[in-house]
Image: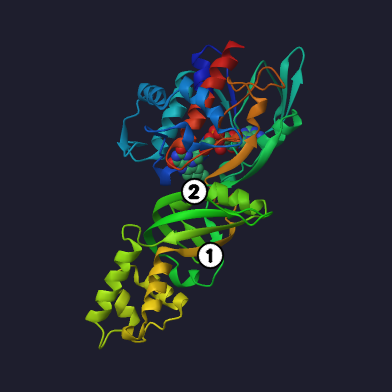
Amino acid sequence: MFGAICAKRAGADVLLLEHTDRIGKKLLATGNGKCNLTNLVLKPGDYHGNHPSFVVPVLERFTQYETLKLFEEMGLVWKDINGLVYPYSNQASTVLDLLRTELKRLHVKVRTEVKVKEILPDAKKGFVLNTSEGELEADCVILACGSKAAPKTGSDGSGYQLAKKLGHSVIEPLPALVQLKAEGGYFKMIAGVRSDCRLKLYIEETANRKKTLIAKESGEVQFTDYGISGIPVFQFSRFAVRALWEKKKAYVVCDFLPQMEETVLYEYLVKKKERISDWGSCEELLLGLLNKKLNLMLLKECGFPAQSKAEELSVHNLKRLCRLMKHWEIPLKGYNSFEQGQICQGGIATEELTENLESRIHKGLYFAGEIIDIDGRCGGYNLQWAWSSAYVAAVHAAEG
Ligand SMILES: Cc1cc2nc3c(=O)[nH]c(=O)nc-3n(C[C@H](O)[C@H](O)[C@H](O)COP(=O)(O)OP(=O)(O)OC[C@H]3O[C@@H](n4cnc5c(N)ncnc54)[C@H](O)[C@@H]3O)c2cc1C
């Protein structure tokens, strides 16, 4: 949609093809229905892929500020929440409707329920598109079919097949910004709990079993009956998913009390133990620290019955409890599917594209958005990549 608008503004005759019954379905699901459309403090380091620096010229060519200017021209009033930009209306449908009305204003031809099945380069015609509604011709094609994530919105991965048939390499698409499944029987006990934690992701090399710290994230972790979710988990999930897919071992170390040093926590527990020594239970010892379910789970994992007397805890066992609260190891065993993943990592190999997002294999063929091997953090980065790459592809396609 954004690419079609930019190409039309640049003077091209544009036809937008969509295989579902409506354009922009995925946008409606973004930002929990509020659409976090960009990020004001975006840096190239917020993006990943086999060649993450590929984003630099594209994001510089069409920045978040230029994106907002274009949306403002369409009529968008927006708000900034710690750098994350949302429509002031708090409705993702506002962003979609503005794009739809701009397409209408510019008289861009939009055809829904047309599936592109094959794209054939043609020496005379440019490209012939084999679609569910017959053949179409085009001088240039922008492939912006999205990924495999949230396939109900239309991104069923068929774009990768179209690109492969045209000779492009596709880095294995895997879910990203996704929940992680963990080993251990404790998760049923703490399902539904949300707690502010600091997480560290480690990956073990298969050859030498060397453990490497890959990422650190802080924020509200959501515990589920199968593992961990929430923004900090989403942010490093791409590394964990790729490692697990490569059959490597991955685990997370969770600090339940990042604001409290282990020695301070120990002192706290010693004092609390003295205070309740002649009557208090282990459960009462931890009362006031964490969510009750977390307290009980940690006691169970340490092997201390919740109702046993706190005064029976030796110095050694008190230290073990502190250690567990600060370094709870969560071995990972899997990840949720494309249905739950917000985006995909992987996609069209960037070595095969120019800075203008034109194919190095077929002149006149362009790529934009999530289909390319670039994935961003959670926080408006992926939509900004979609806007910037669509703009760059569109203005060059319009020139061609
Ligand atoms: C639940 C959820 C929440 C998200 N929240 C945010 C957020 O707040 N901020 C953010 O930055 N990002 C967010 N994202 C990610 C963001 O939505 C995507 O990165 C972005 O939509 C990608 O845009 P795209 O145009 O590349 O692909 P898409 O938006 O997937 O669009 C591709 C379109 O192509 C169509 N299509 C596919 N194949 C064919 C074919 N063969 N023929 C015809 N049509 C075809 C599809 O039906 C689809 O309409 C979220 C994603 C999800 C799933």
Q: Locate residue 4 relative to residue 366 in the image: left or right.
A: left
Mark 1 or mark 2, earlier in chain: 2
Q: Is residue 24 left or right of residue 280?
A: right
Q: Amino acid at mark 2?
A: Ala
Could you tell me which quadrant the C terminus lies in?
top right
Q: Mark 1 is on which residue type?
A: Tyr
Question: Going 71% across and 33% down the picture, which residue do you hit?
Answer: 169
Q: Which mark is residue 74?
A: none
Q: Position of residue 202 (x, y in %)?
A: 54, 54
Q: Secondary structure at mark 1?
A: loop
Residue 215, which numbered label? 2
Evaluate whether residue 23 shows in this view.
Answer: no
Tell me residue 365's x, y (percent). Answer: 66, 21
Toward the viewer: 337 or 32? 337
Task: Estimate how packed mark 2 is, as few (under 14), some (14 to 19) or many (20 or more) residues with alpha carbons within 10 Å.
Answer: some
Q: Is residue 255 left or right of residue 226?
A: left
Callouts 1 and 2 close, C-beta under 8 Å: no
Give the labeled residue for mark 1.
226
- Closer to the camera, 174 or 128? 174
Vertical position of residue 312 compared to residue 182: above or below = below
Residue occupying the point 64% across, 24% down: 353
Q: Nearer the viewer, residue 274 or 48?
A: 274
The part of the image, by quadrant, that contains residue 222 is: bottom left
Q: Quadrant of ligand 1?
A: top right
Q: Is residue 125 left or right of residue 198?
A: right
Query: Where 306 falls versus 201 (above or below)?
Result: below
Q: Nearer the viewer, residue 70 or 240?
A: 240
Q: Quadrant of residue 80?
A: top left
Q: Residue at x 28, y 70 (%)?
A: 267
Q: CA distance from mark 1 to mark 2?
A: 22 Å
